[in-house]
Amino acid sequence: MRDLRHSAASNMVNSGLDLFAVGKVLGHASYQSTQRYSRLTNDTPLAAAEAGAANAGWSN
């Protein structure tokens, strides 16, 4: 069951949901619990940085 929760959390975070929403779905009482359960792929932080740059007008 624990592996399923880790997979679900990771899939939700990597699809763009924030940790607060994922924590609510999984019934976590704290942000730290959700953070331990979720694992980001390498593409997720890159996509976040690119989205932030685009919204700030820094993209090429």
Image (cartoon, grey):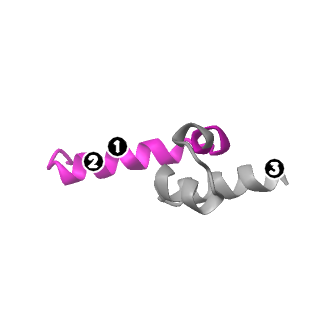
* Residue 23 highlighted magenta (yes or no): no
Instruction: Identify the residue at horizontal 55%, vertical 41% (top origin).
Output: 42
Mark 2 or mark 3, earlier in chain: 3
Q: Which residue is mark 2?
A: 52
Place of residue 34 in the rendered image (x, y in percent of width and height, measured from the top left): 59, 45
Circle 1 sits in a helix, a strand or a loop, which is it?
helix
Between 37 and 16, the one lying in front of the other is 37
Q: Could you tell me if the residues under marks 2 and 1 are in contact, i.e. CB atoms within 8 Å?
A: yes
Image quarter hosting the N terminus? bottom right
Circle 3 sits in a helix, a strand or a loop, which is it?
helix
Q: Nearer the viewer, mark 2 or mark 3?
A: 3
Q: Which residue is mark 1?
A: 49
Q: Amino acid at mark 2?
A: Gly
Q: CA distance from mark 3 to mark 1?
A: 29 Å
Residue 41 visible within the image: no
Q: Nearer the viewer, mark 3 or mark 1?
A: 3
Other-residue count near label 1 (Cα within 10 Å), few / some / many at <14 / 14–19 / ≥20: few
Place of residue 29 in the rendered image (x, y in percent of width and height, measured from the top left): 58, 47
Q: Amino acid at mark 3?
A: Asp
Place of residue 49 in the rendered image (x, y in percent of width and height, measured from the top left): 34, 43
Q: Give the total number of marks visible in the rendering.
A: 3
Q: Which circle marks residue 3 in the picture? A: 3
Q: Which residues lie in the magenta part?
A: 34-60
Looking at the magenta stretch, what is its main secondary structure? helix
Between 13 and 42, the one lying in front of the other is 13
